[in-house]
Image (cartoon, rainbow, N blue to C red):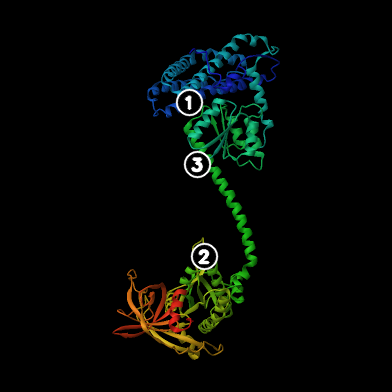
Amino acid sequence: MSTTESDPGQTETQKTTPAVQRDSGPEAEGEQSPPALWAHLRHELRTPLNAIIGYSEMLLGDADGPGLADYVSDLNQILSAGHQLLEIINDLLDPSQVASGDVVFNLASLVANLHYKVRIPLNSIIGFSEILLENAAEQGQEDLIADLKKIHSAAALFLSRVNEIVDFSKIDAGLKASGPEVSDRSSLIHCALTSLRELAPDSAAATGGESGSILVVDDNEINRDLLSRYLERQGHTVQVADNGRLALEMIATGAFDLVLLDIMMPELNGYQVLQHLKQSETWRDLPVIMISALDEIDSAVRCIELGAEDYLRKPFNPVLLRARVQACLEKKRLRDLKVAQQRQLHELNAALELRNRFIRQTFGSYLSDEIVDTILKKGGLKIAGEKRRATILMADLRGFTSISERLPAEDVVAMINIYLETMTEIIQKYQGTIDEFIGDGILVIFGAPILRPDDPRRAVACAVEMQLAMTSVNEQNRQAGYPEVALGIGINTGEVVIGNIGSKKRIKYAVVGRAVNLTARIESYTVGGQIFISESTLYECGDICRIDNAMQVMPKGVKKPLTIHEVGGIGGDFQLFLPPKKEITWIELQQRLPVQFTVLDWKSTGELGHGGAITKIAPNRVEIHSEVLPSPLANLRISLYDPDDHEISDDLYGKVVARLSESPPAFLVHFTSLPPEAETFLAEFLGTALN
């Protein structure tokens, strides 16, 4: 292949007008012509060099592919020659080396050095590329042939540009002597000056490891191809535009994270596109990197003043390009994040404003008006943690977990809401602070944020009224077709820490301490309908409480036994009493009912369980004989069988309420949860449904 042949399909530049040709018309820009000409020549000569260096680097990057190892040495020769040519052009067309304002004088100086300096490295590129093309054709390396043709075509284009400059110098040898009236001028000079007039400062506006979607804007096909392939290899999505007007249309309809923008383009040049983007409210934050063969400091400064994120010279360094692209995408990501956070902050402020209008109603659903006023009043509530004596009430529906597993979710929520709505009104009536709803459990504080001398008495009165209200709760459940439920309540008085706990992200006004843990232990000993209080609470209440029973327990974490008291009512100013307990009628079974049970309170609960048999039955209660004797108030999970050992249900729960005998072991169990099939089965032995 001769040095004058080229592949016209590989480069758009070869279809345009030559770099230098004759034209006519007065030259009005004589003073600016040397800088204009030098800038334009650098752009025209660097464009093919960009292709030579870029495609060589990409092919070398793929050298570990099949059949490419033999090409490495020659490709390195081409790459080295390309860099050598770039150094020659940068040196010969250095703007600081322009000797005078005379175009012909500087052009003659350029021609005197250009032709012989570029000859050796250019011939090296053309020669090695032809050799590689022949080898690739013999080996059928179609992908390699396409890129080698682009290198060869770029070298031919570079040679044609050099020849145009030399030919122009010969044709216009008499320009200097002819004076300003000479009419013949090169279109290269004319185009350069015209382009610079369009980009003149008086038309400018006032200065003002991510993957992304990138728009490459360049009128040169080789440049577009090189940039696109480099960026796609880095994981980016790339679209291209060959002029500024098309770029603006694509930006208006697409979603880009970054624009790589050439300066010298038809229709709209890079400065004008950049100016348009930065004046737009919509697109001003879209980052733009300018990539151009124009290397004057004024061009770079102007681009930065117009709002460009960065400025890269052609031919670009792939490593530097990658770093600049990543930096811009990271800035874009952070900018987008900031915008999203500002939008979210605005939404949160709007939500906060809306919430503040309803805050009294929200707090009022759980607290008394007096406590709400204290919390909302500026400086009226001590937020820091503090120790104080308070009375803690814990309430829990017995066996509700088992019930919830058998019901649809909407029925479970409806039942909880019936219960909580009733209890909340009662707690508010007695000026308690609801600290927590834990499913069907309620934690209430009496003595915070406001401490009153009658906190323990109000807590007990509240508990009694809550138990009395269960009649109304179960009536609503029956009307809705839901099962009845029973409530257990524990109360304790002691020193606690009250205040804000949590983190900066989530803060909660809460109560913590041993007294809270002990309250939970006391509540766990209850069965449905019971209220247990500690000795400290009983002491604070005085003699106005009706105590139906007392027992010693050994809660976990306590060093010595505690006495807890079952409350049947409270007198004084409250006069609230639970109905007297009915005498229990026991039915002795003619045929024992087999059971298996597991003691849930024991540390080892993984065993299948212990065997036993029900010998007596009463409403919600049974007497069991077994080979083991559980602790008083231990919680059991029971599997029930009929006399023929057919399982009725394995989901019964109960609490040991009395030990009858150690030998043989016998004890009484109060059921806390009975599935419907077990309830129906046991009811047959009573002659009526359990209630």
Contact between marks 1 and 3 (CB within 8 A): the answer is no
- Amino acid, disc 3: Glu
Q: Residue at x 57, y 46 (%)?
A: 336
Q: Secondary structure at mark 3?
A: loop
Tell me, for residue 674, which label it has, or none.
Answer: none
In the displayed structure, 236 sits above or below 476; it is: above
User: Looking at the rendering, which quadrant does residue 554 occupy?
Assistant: bottom left
Question: In the displayed structure, does residue 587 sit left or right of residue 478?
Answer: left
Q: Nearer the viewer, residue 410 or 303?
A: 410
Cα separation between marks 2 and 3: 36 Å
Q: Nearer the viewer, residue 594 or 124?
A: 594
Contact between marks 1 and 2 (CB within 8 A): the answer is no
The residue under label 1 is 55
Contact between marks 2 and 3 (CB within 8 A): the answer is no
The residue under label 3 is 210
Residue 540 % position (x, y): 48, 86
The residue under label 2 is 507
- Amino acid, disc 2: Ile
